[in-house]
Structures are given as C-alpha cells and as structure tokens.
Amino acid sequence: MTELYTRELNGAGMWSRIIGRHKTLRITDLEGGANVGMLLYNATERHERYNMPDTLKGQHIFYLRAPYCVHSDMGRLFASITKDTVGWHDTVCGAGDAALAIQKYGAKTFQESRNEFHRNSRDCFLIELSKWGLGERDLVPNINWFSKVVADEEGRLSFISGHSRTGDSIDLRFEMDTLVVLNSCQHPLDPDPKYHPRPVRLEVFKSDPPAIDDPSFTVRPENARAHQSTDEFYLLSQ
Amino acid sequence: MIESTLNPADAIHDEVVLAGDHWLHLIREGQTLRIEDVEGNQAADTLFYSASDPLDRYSAGDTIRHQAALYLTTGTKLMSTRGNTLLTIVADTCGRHDTLGGACSRESNVMRYDFDRESMHACRDSFIRGLQCWSHGMGKRDITCNINFFMNVPVTPDGQLSFADGVSGPGRYVEMRAGMDVMCLISNCPQLNNPCNDFNPTPVRVLIWD
C-alpha cells in the first residue's frame, strides 16, 4: 500500500477528515493503553452515519475486530477492519463528558495548565462535528478503538486494563467516501484515576478494492448484502 | 422484579398503541409512564427527548456508562446526551430491557435478511413520521439509539450477541418517573423477521399518572 498521509495525534487530540472509498486508515497505539473514539458519516450525505445497533446485530457480535465491518444506518458499510493486532474494540460505552472528567480527574483549566488542561471526548466530538456542519443531533454512540469492555451474565461491564500494547494497530479500509471524526481521549470506563490520554499515529494508504472472497464479505451474509448496497450507491450516483 | 402500587383506574391517560403505529406524548416532570406488554413478547422501541429542548435527548451510551451495565431495569436512570436524567425506572415486572438492539429499518432489514424485505414496515419509518408530527423540523437525523422495552438481547461474556426469545409475557409492564418534561416517542415494532416479538407484533398499552 502506498502511504498518502501520516500524522501523530497527541493524547486527547481531535481530528476529522474525509477519507475516500478504498483508502485505508491505520491507527497505531504509540504508548499502549490508547483509546480512540470514532464517529463516521457519509461524506456527501451526512445524515447517513455510523450505527452501533446495526453494526452489532448485523454481525451478531458485541465488539469489533477483523474481519468485521463498520455499518451505517442505511444498510451500507463505512469500513472493513482488514488488519487488527488488538482483537477487541468497544462499541457500547460511548464518550465521557465534562462532568465525568471533573469527577474522575478533577478540574484542570486552560488558565492554570495551558494545553495540559482536561479535555473530554464529547466536547471533542462536538467541536469537530461543527466544522462539517454537524452538531448535537448527529452525536450517536461511538466506537472506542483499542478498548476492551466485557459484560457478565447480568450485563455488568468491566473495563480490561492493559488491553492494547505499544505498537498495536488497526487498518480500516473504507468502502464509502467517509467523514471520519475521532479523538484520543480516555475511555469513559477506564478506572485509571490519572488523566493520561495516549498518543496515536494516523496513516492513510492507497489500497485495493476488496475481492469477492474478501473476509469482510464471507464472515457474515449480512456483510455481503451491505457491500452490495454500498456498491449500488456508487453505481447509481457516479 | 418490582411491582407498581399505582391503580390504572387513577391514570390520567390510558391508551392502546397498535403494532406498527407510533405514539408521541408529553410526560411532565413527576408524572409516571407505564408501558404494558399486553399479549407478551412485544418490543416497544422508545425514544425520549427533553420537551423544552429536543437537542437534549436519550443517550444509550450515557445510560450504559452511568450504570456500567447493559440492561435496563428498576433503578436505571435513562440519561440524556447532556447528562440529565430524563426518567428513572421505578417498577418493572419484565426484569430486563434492551438498549443495544436499536430499531429496525427497511434498509437494515435488507442487510439482515434479504433484498426482498425492503418493502416491509419498520420502526425507523414510524420514528420519522412521529418526529415530523412533533413539528420542530425533526426527522431521521434525530433518531438516536433507542430503548427496546421488553426485548431480550443477551450478550455473552465472550462478546457474542443474539436476539433471544423474550423474557416478557402477557401483562408485564415497566414504569418510569420523569425527572423533567420529556416527549416520549414509541414505535410499536412491526418486525416480522425475528423473534424480538415472537414473529407476531401485538399492541402495547400506555398509561400516565400524575
């Protein structure tokens, strides 16, 4: 794959770009223990967005890993996870907000701490969304890449500390022209009492369209139909 | 399981919502809403919004992270996107309600089942019509990840997710008290392709007490 872009994102950094269909975004955890909150929107029809329930029930799974896919709320695919050294990414815990940051880490203002002040994932999402004409109406449950949360029989959740290690990475091959909105704030259920968001590297590569026997198709018949609907979207609109 | 002490004869509102219909109604702060699974194994797909500012709305992610648990039952605070408590569940004779499964749509029915299911009625179409009736210029964009009262979507410790037979039954109900003025939008699920409603969509009954 030919590299088109590389950028390091500091802890609690925020980033949003449009990534074209069949390009690949690689996210690398540079220090271990990273969390990347992500929301996705159709680059041209931004009312089409990432849908946690369709992603889960379409694939009968509670978390994400290769070779599963990220589904939109219109029966189509944003991305396929083509490489993944982590194996479990949280989909249900959402984003922390300012109240949670104060409760967990205490108040730390810009006035006293300059750019070490305490950011939170919800505010980061809203800031980046606004730059693309989106806002609170567009805030839906996000993916938390690199974080593992498990449920017991009663549905009680536990955050698994130390899950992602230095150098762990995921590759997302985009199947749709996608507005990607992300931030590297800590996971809301991370029990670490210390404010310690980790940096990640973002790289974008030119990559090939999926072959018909690509694992993202064959892992579930639902994904094959979602691939077909995505292809039809471009067949008709381009 | 916590039973209610409220008497249906004292309710200020008592209505049956047929399968496939939507129901939009104001619940004032302090009022109690009951949703009853009349015939059993129905799914009541439900969204809540602040009545005064609809940008503040039900958030599945915030509800899950506040209680660090997936299923909704007595004691669960239904949280909004701005961190407010919309309602608190105060009685529940079903025992477990879902907020991961979302709502069916014509597009997701194609993805999940087949291209020939596209014409079948679905919850997100009902949500769209309900939101349009509220006249804040709302529509698809305002459909967030909803609650499925009476639906059973168990997650296993190894991370598998399934749509299991309901744990609900005829006459089971869930009751919640509003912590602020909220608009409730229910789509009484018309899904015919999975066991979320035993392949047989049936009415729910909604009651409100002061």
Image: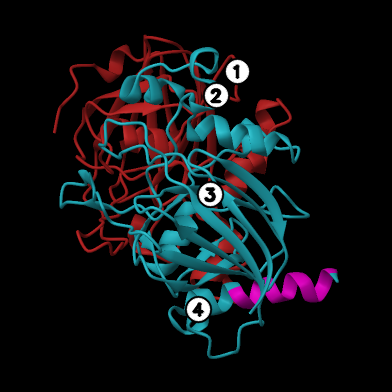
Q: Which residues are magenta?
A: A227-237
Q: Which chain letter matches label 3?
A: A
Residue A127, percent from left and from top: 64, 32
Q: Residue furthest right?
A: A238
The majority secondary structure of the magenta stretch comes to helix
Q: Earlier in the sequence, mark 4 or mark 3?
A: 3
Q: Nearer the viewer, mark 4 or mark 3?
A: 3
What color is chain A drawn in?
A: cyan
Q: Which chain letter matches label 2?
A: B
Labels 3 and 1 positioned on one and the same chain: no
- Look at label 3 and name its amino acid: Met
Q: Which residue is mark 3?
A: A38
Counting every numbered tag in the picture gives 4
Q: Which residue is mark 2?
A: B56
- Look at label 2 and name its amino acid: Asp
Determine the residue positioned at 64% across, 42% down. B128
Labels 4 and 1 positioned on one and the same chain: no
The image quadrant that residue A173 belongs to is bottom right
**Residue contact between numbered discs 1 and 2, judged by CB atoms under 8 Å:** yes
Q: Which residue is mark 1?
A: B53
Residue A137, percent from left and from top: 63, 34
Does any portion of residue B187 appear in the rendered image? yes
Q: Nearer the viewer, mark 4 or mark 1?
A: 4
- Frontmost residue, B139 versus A135: A135
**B29 up-or-down from B147: above or below:** above
What color is chain B drawn in?
A: red
